[in-house]
Image (cartoon, helix red, strand yellow):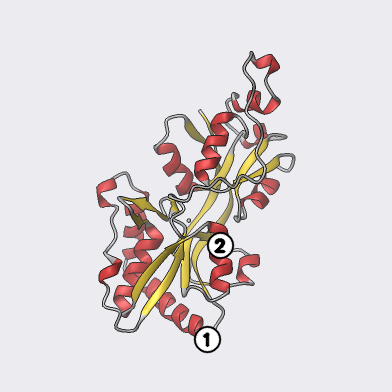
Amino acid sequence: MKRSVLAAAMSVMVLAAGCSAPAGNNNNAPAQQQAAQEKYTSLSQLAGKTIGVQTGTSMGDTVKEAIPTASVSQYRNYTFLIDALKKGEIAAFPGDDPVIREICAKDSQLTFINEQVDPGDFAFAFPKTEEGNKLLAEFNEYMTKIKSDGTLKQMQDKWTGANDDEKIVPDHTALPADKGTLKFATEGDYAPFDYFKDNKVVGLDIDIAINFCQEYGYGLEIYTMSFSEIIPSIHDKKYDFGGAGITVTDERSEQVNFSEPDYSGGTVFCVLK
């Protein structure tokens, strides 16, 4: 998945969007409008189409590897990607499997192509500093524990499951902060990893961060921002750590250190039904 309330700050930053189709029959509509009305059931059908991606992510590279002849347009977040898809500006957009499943479950107009590509690990990011390394060591100790005792699997099942009533997190403002307070960077727009529910940021990564702080004696302040800001901000030591469904890549690893993964998965492409 996060920052200074992106959900409230929805200033569109579409970097390269197509135009809406003019009124008229399909023979006179732009090629992309016609393409958006097609039914896509395989990645091969997306060859030569325009695919939307979220800016600041590695999804552009994923598109080029999976569909070399496709062109790429960038949009600020999934709200704008969904809108572009419905307007026919793009034929599809990629996302991490659990995220796309969540989007499609909540919108009857959307589905996804059941071909998973670009498998990867999601993890938390930490500054490449002495303090960052100490915190990372504690966090990895915690991750090892919750993996071995089954807690992580329970968390994953909760946040990817259908029971919305279970999707709650502890109150991070009530943590005792015996060892000081940590600043956590996230996005708030990447369910099931981090998103707003009842005006609170919740999700798998938020749940893990709060429970880690609770167990290790830290207080926690959660900051939301655009996804593209998270890694640079942690690199610049503005935050102690961050998590937002962040895929571990070689490029990002040059800027920050990554924890043990909290989720592993691949990418699928969202299309219109």
Q: Which mark is residue 130?
A: 1
Residue farthest toward the bottom in the current orientation of the protein = 130
Q: Secondary structure at mark 2?
A: helix
Q: Position of residue 122 (x, y in %)?
A: 50, 61
Which image quadrant is residue 224 in? Answer: bottom left
Q: Residue at x 35, y 60 (%)?
A: 153
Residue 159: x percent and y percent?
35, 53
Residue 253 placement: quadrant = bottom right
Three-letter code for the amino acid on which mark 1 is drawn: Glu
- Residue 120 visible in the picture: yes
Judge whether 44 appears above or below 116 on screen: above
Quadrant for residue 183, please give it: bottom left
| Residue shown at the point (47%, 72%) measured from the top left | 241
Tell how many labels: 2
Is 234 situated left or right of 71 in this image?
A: left
The residue where tag 2 is placed is 229
Coordinates of residue 177 in the picture (x, y in percent): 30, 79
* Residue 148 seen: no
Picture coordinates of residue 18, whole percent (x, y): 66, 35
Q: Secondary structure at mark 1?
A: helix
Relative to 64, residue 82 above or below: above
Q: Residue at x 34, y 62 (%)?
A: 207
Q: Three-letter amino acid code at disc 2?
A: Glu
* Callout 1–callout 2 Cβ contact below 8 Å: no
